[in-house]
Image (cartoon, helix red, strand yellow):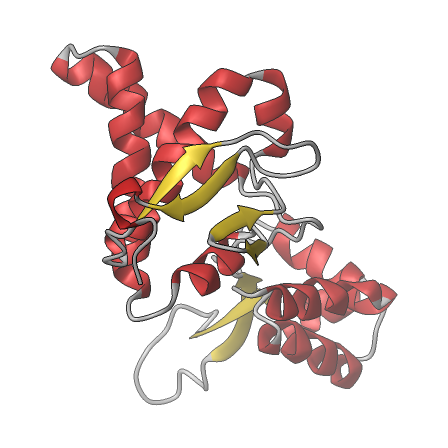
Amino acid sequence: MDIETQAAGIGALAEPIRRALYEYVVAQGEPVGREQAAAAVDLPGHKAIFHLDRLVEEGLLEVEFRRLSGKSGPGAGRPSKLYRRSEREWSVSLPARRYDLVGRILAAGVDRARREQVELDDALDDAATAEGVSVGDDARPSSLPDVLTHLGYEPRSEDEVLVLANCPFDALAQDHTDLVCGLNRSFVQGVADGLGRKDVEACLAPQQGHCCVKIRPRRADRGGA
């Protein structure tokens, strides 16, 4: 999800009644109906359904229809509208952070190293590259700067170099610089490769206040068109 969608969804919880309804629904073991939720927060039913449906619109809750009596067939009555937590995950961070992404890369690399008995460094590098290629391939025909923007890198063009002003893995990179920066470089290169950008290479070029990776024209292409 883009930041506008995420911010709008989480912003819906700023309203106290809406937040109370959400907290009640997600705390239950089963989907709940309007009357149950309304009673829990001491709210008239018609007001509860307004706020519950707003939470559905924003993607925070989901709806299902089920007969609470367990009966079926004629005379069983209409199914009840029930609310439950959405399966969508929410996370807003400014500047953008993607610890889920680096976590997925690390897990894939460790898993491969154990399963195939290969060197951990090689497995992690391959996992980062593969993840990047997958992201780039899925994003075609988008441009490389657009994809990196979506990932939170804040790319800026300086002459022939694409400078990444933000590191999505900042806290981890500060504590485990060599490991995370190496994975970062491999991931960014994978994104470029997945987009078919064989004319560029991701390089480690640490700069204060920026991501450690910059993207330059491949050496053989420098000086060309």
Residue 175 x, y percent position in the rendering: 62, 17
Quadrant location of the C terminus? bottom left
Residue 1 x, y percent position in the rendering: 52, 64
Q: Is residue 116 left or right of residue 69?
A: left
Residue 112 higher or lower than 224, as above or below: above
Pick the front one: 215 or 120: 215
Residue 219 x, y percent position in the rendering: 30, 41
Residue 5 higher or lower than 31, as above or below: below
Pick the front one: 200 or 36: 200
The quarter holding residue 6 reads bottom right
Pick the front one: 97 or 201: 201
The quarter holding residue 54 reads bottom right
Furthest-front residue in this view: 223
Q: Which residue is depicted at the point 28% across and 37% down?
A: 129
Residue 155 higher or lower than 98, as above or below: below
Q: Which residue is depicted at the point 76% across and 63% down?
A: 13
Furthest-left residue in this view: 116
